[in-house]
Image (cartoon, rainbow, N blue to C red):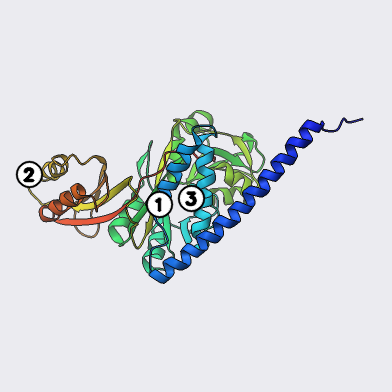
Amino acid sequence: MTKGPSPSLIKLREQIDTIDDQILALLKERLSHAKEIGRIKDKNKQAKWDPLREREILERINRNNRAEFPEQPLYSIFHEIITTCRLSQKAVDIAFLGPEATYSHLAAMKHFGHQALYRPCETIEDIFIEVTAGRIRYGVVPVENSIEGAVTPSLDAFMKYRVKICGEVHLEISHNLINQTGEMADIQVVASHSQPLAQCRQWLKKNLAAIPCQTVFSTGVAAQMATKDKTVAAIASSLAAKIYQLQVVTKGIEDYRGNTTRFLVIGQKAPSRSGKDKTSLLIGLLDRPGALNDTLQILASRDINLTRIESRPVKGGMPWKYLFFIDMLGHIDDPIIKDGCDQLRTGCSYFECLGSYPAAQESSADL
């Protein structure tokens, strides 16, 4: 005969049930207040998203926690609560490089939570087109990887379309080899986006040297191919394996641990200051000796901390002409940043502020 739970266990479970009911009641109350705030903001024509307020809430929760509840899960819980309450004020649609379960999809959910309306796009350029046209509120695009460097289609699209950067997301990437059977012997071709294929290059060379690789638009497309063909294996996330009902052949096949991709959130209007921001610029240099050094000196003399500089060739019949992407710590409304940018405007052949936006929360993601 199976022994039932002890009276002490039953009592503890009842207490947990009571706490859960209290949490639910408070969540409903918080949601009600958030909706009322939304109505007030609509009346006063105020922006729905206040990055500074959200950062202050999360910092206050972390201080009051005093490390008793695990910090990262606590952040995830309250980030989801805050995002859900904000989205209750107005539904938001998000474009990402589809189909479902790509790393872009995961990054979008990490930033916007699970209540947003997610719209898959076939290419990165399609995301820029939808946002520029105003058909989609925000887009999430990969911009650089810690192992393979810049994602050039995103950089080129910033040069072509007029959008603003509204946020950034850092997503730790763990690649899985998945197929229908979970057996490596069935694999005759490996499909994935060019970045995952490059990030798993050594593993593939060592374990599947005779198997050809096929580059496709996204990891989600690769997973879809694997569902239709037993001989195809995809390099994709564990979420892709779950959604497309595939089996994991081998987990974590990336060549380097700590593999992280940086994504940018794009929209038509940059957010207000959060207190911990980045600013991104797109500039062109005058055709003279020392132009790049003079530009960097303008920023260095003001103690502006650069986090990234990347060059891309100008398309369309202008050989050997380049534009530079520059990321720096601070907001365009900060006096030092504003002064430095004003000086750059006068000394550059081209200047565009792509946006000031909240810096990414440093945290891992469950893939």
Disc 2, SS: loop
The residue most toward the left is 289
**Residue 289 quadrant:** top left
| Residue 18 placement (x, y as % from top left) | 70, 45
Which residue position is annotated with label 1? 53
Q: Which residue is drawn at 9% across and 42% down?
A: 290
Q: Which mark is residue 218?
A: 3
Find out whether the residues at labels 2 and 3 contact each other: C-beta distance under 8 Å. no
| Residue 268 placement (x, y as % from top left) | 35, 63
The mark that comes first in sequence, 1 or 3, is: 1
Mark 2 packing: few (<14 Cα in 10 Å), some, or many (20+)? few
Amino acid marked by disc 3? Ser
Distance between mark 1 and mark 3 Cα atoms: 35 Å
Q: Which residue is drawn at 25% across and 57% down?
A: 315
The mark that comes first in sequence, 2 or 1, is: 1
Can you say whether 179 is above or below 161 in the image? above
Amino acid marked by disc 1? Arg
Distance between mark 2 and mark 1 Cα atoms: 46 Å
Q: In the rendered view, does 315 fall on the left or right side of 228?
A: left
| Residue 17 placement (x, y as % from top left) | 71, 44
The residue most toward the bottom is 43
Disc 3, SS: loop
Distance between mark 2 and mark 3 Cα atoms: 41 Å
**Residue 233 quadrant:** top right
Mark 2, mark 1: which one is toward the viewer?
A: 1
Q: Residue at x 74, y 38 (%)?
A: 13
Q: In the rendered view, does 181 fall on the left or right side of 165?
A: right
Amino acid marked by disc 2? Pro
Which residue position is annotated with label 2? 289
Image quadrant occupied by the C terminus: top right
